[in-house]
Amino acid sequence: MLIVGGGVVGLCAALLLQYHGLDSVLVERRSGPSVLPRSRGLHARTSEIFRQLGIEEQVQAASALALKAGEFGGYRMGPTMLTSIAQPIPAKAEHFETPSPSSFCFLPQVELEPLLIDIARQRGADLRFDTELTTLRSHADGIEAVIARAGSGLQRVIGADYVIAADGANSGIRNSLGITGWELPPTHHYINVFFHADLADRVAGRTFSQCQIDNDIVHALMLSKNNTDEWSLHIEYDPNEETLADYPPSRCADLVREAIGAGDIDVEVLVRAVWDTGVHVANTYRHDRVLLAGDAAHRHSPSGGFGANTGIGDVHNLAWKLAAVLTGRAKPALLDTYEPERRPQAVTGARQARLRTDPQTRFQKAGAPGAPAELIDMEAVMTRYRYLSPAGADATSTTGHVAELRGQRGTRVPHLWLTRGEQRISTLDLCGPGFALITDVDHAAWADAARRAESETGCVVAVHGVGHDLVDIDGAWRAITGLHGGGALLVRPDHHVAARSDDDLSPATLASLLTSMLV
Ligand SMILES: Cc1cc2nc3c(=O)[nH]c(=O)nc-3n(C[C@H](O)[C@H](O)[C@H](O)COP(=O)(O)OP(=O)(O)OC[C@H]3O[C@@H](n4cnc5c(N)ncnc54)[C@H](O)[C@@H]3O)c2cc1C
């Protein structure tokens, strides 16, 4: 496996492939992690993926240190940061409505990426920074990639079975393959100014996550990185009139002071970059042996925090499929399920992010008076989506989503705390790296069926018995899933329900269902 791009998505791909027993080489043209703060929030669904990788605690520990002021804060609006007023956030509670063993986690990308690099290296990943992919050639039996060491002119050719193109929004791989996309033009253009300014005393008692600032000189969104001395100011600009070159550090520092509302502050501009709210979702996620993931596959406005989180979901979906194909347990056609499962989710995220570019809509609760009818809540976008049959999907199809996770086919398995001996475990902990069969009494019949399915398919099918080896303290499993005694759920390595016993799953059909799933 070759991974091109060592951003958050490429790094997660390396960890996930490793989890599934695959070696990979990751090439990244930068010399280290990104220094540009972009993503700050990890949705609970992403934390669940980190939990499966066994890195959730490390990420949460880093998160606890990231916010020096101790709290994430809310949303404020005003002519300056200092005169801004806290706004109510009606949608806030919705973030935590879907039961999960994990939670939303604040960890800026600039701190997450170095952590992922460390963990991946400790686990033996081959991460090559200062290394650029220059050419990709596809053959019938593999990929030939030319990689170059930055600044040395030295080139090497390496072979790979498949390539994950996690090479970002301007993906050279996507462009070289001529893959076009569904696009929406930008509504806003911004200069992202990451700066250092000690504002600890000035924000004490009124920390914030986002502060919308509008005065005669600057229209901007100020985002906190640690709510004390590192911040980003996203300054609106008109690309028909100006470029990044018109915003040298000295001008940016002046605009930062205007936005804060204090001319006496020491401001050190650390990095500047441009971005816009335009949407691009690739029309094709798979081209032969190349699979697009992350921003290479979908790019949209950050409002809602769906971008990196969706990218991590992409590689979670992909890694077990690649492992099944590369170990001969599945046919390459299994990889064709990647696009119909993940692309609608990206379109949903893009549409929902677009709605949230409007500050009035950003924090509204879906269905509340005055909220746009199309607005769906964040957890529906990030956790309660449903992989549907590809039949009938077109370029702008969005995901289906469910009101509650009840073990519906195609949804993330519902979370329930169970006990095994002294241990408290989530139903999500039962999943991966193989398939999980969560049964409810009649355990022996299912266990026999699982052994037969394993020998026919080569896939691991771990059987977990609620009421057998697992205690469901509150007796909730049947109520949540609607399954009766003797029922079972077959769950994929990526936590998604593949089959239910009140549909076509039975001890007699398990092996054939699994075989048909692996195409
Ligand atoms: C202002 C802002 C705020 C955001 N906030 C959030 C948020 O809160 N939550 C969220 O989920 N998302 C957020 N996003 C989006 C998020 O930052 C992106 O979705 C995420 O960074 C995409 O990660 P990636 O790994 O796909 O791409 P990137 O981070 O762009 O990484 C791609 C990497 O590929 C490398 N590369 C490219 N070509 C080659 C090559 N030929 N050879 C070797 N290396 C190559 C690049 O150097 C780069 O490091 C935000 C974005 C912006 C602009």
Image (tube, helix red, strand yellow):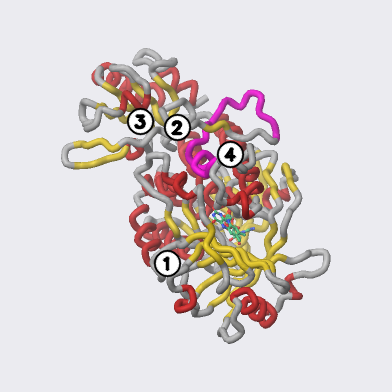
Q: Position of residue 350 (x, y in %)?
A: 64, 45
Q: Mark number for residue 345?
A: 4
For label 3, count other residues whose C-alpha is less than 10 Å away and answer few (under 14), some (14-19) or many (20+): many
Q: Which mark is residue 427?
A: none
Name the amino acid, label 4. Answer: Gln
Name the front one of labels 4 and 1: 1
Query: Farthest residue in the bottom direction?
Result: 264
Q: Amino acid at mark 1?
A: Leu
**Is label 2 in a helix, a strand or a loop?**
loop
* Number of callouts: 4
Q: Nearer the viewer, mark 3 or mark 4?
A: 4
Distance CA(mark 3)–CA(mark 1): 37 Å
Q: Is residue 154 visible?
A: no
Q: Going 37% across and 60% down the picture, which residue do you hit?
A: 122
Q: Nearer the viewer, mark 3 or mark 1?
A: 1
Image side of residue 97 versus residue 318, left or right: left
First along the sequence among labels 2 and 1: 1
Residue assigned mark 1: 67
Label 3 to label 4: alpha-carbon separation: 24 Å
Task: Name the residue that disc number 2 marks.
Answer: 404
Q: Earlier in the sequence, mark 3 or mark 1?
A: 1
Q: Residues within 10 Å of mark 4 (few under 14, many from 20)?
A: many
Residue where numbered disc 3 is placed? 436
Instruction: Describe residue 127's horizontal placement relative to residue 416 as left or right.
Output: right
Residue 2's place in the image compared with 152, above or below, is above
Q: Residue furthest right?
A: 240
On the question of residue 376 being in view, the answer is yes
Looking at the rendering, the stretch of residues picked out in magenta corresponds to 377-395
Asked whether residue 206 is drawn in magenta, I would say no
Q: Amino acid at mark 2?
A: Glu
Whether ligand 1 has any atom under 8 Å from the Cβ at mark 3 is answered as: no
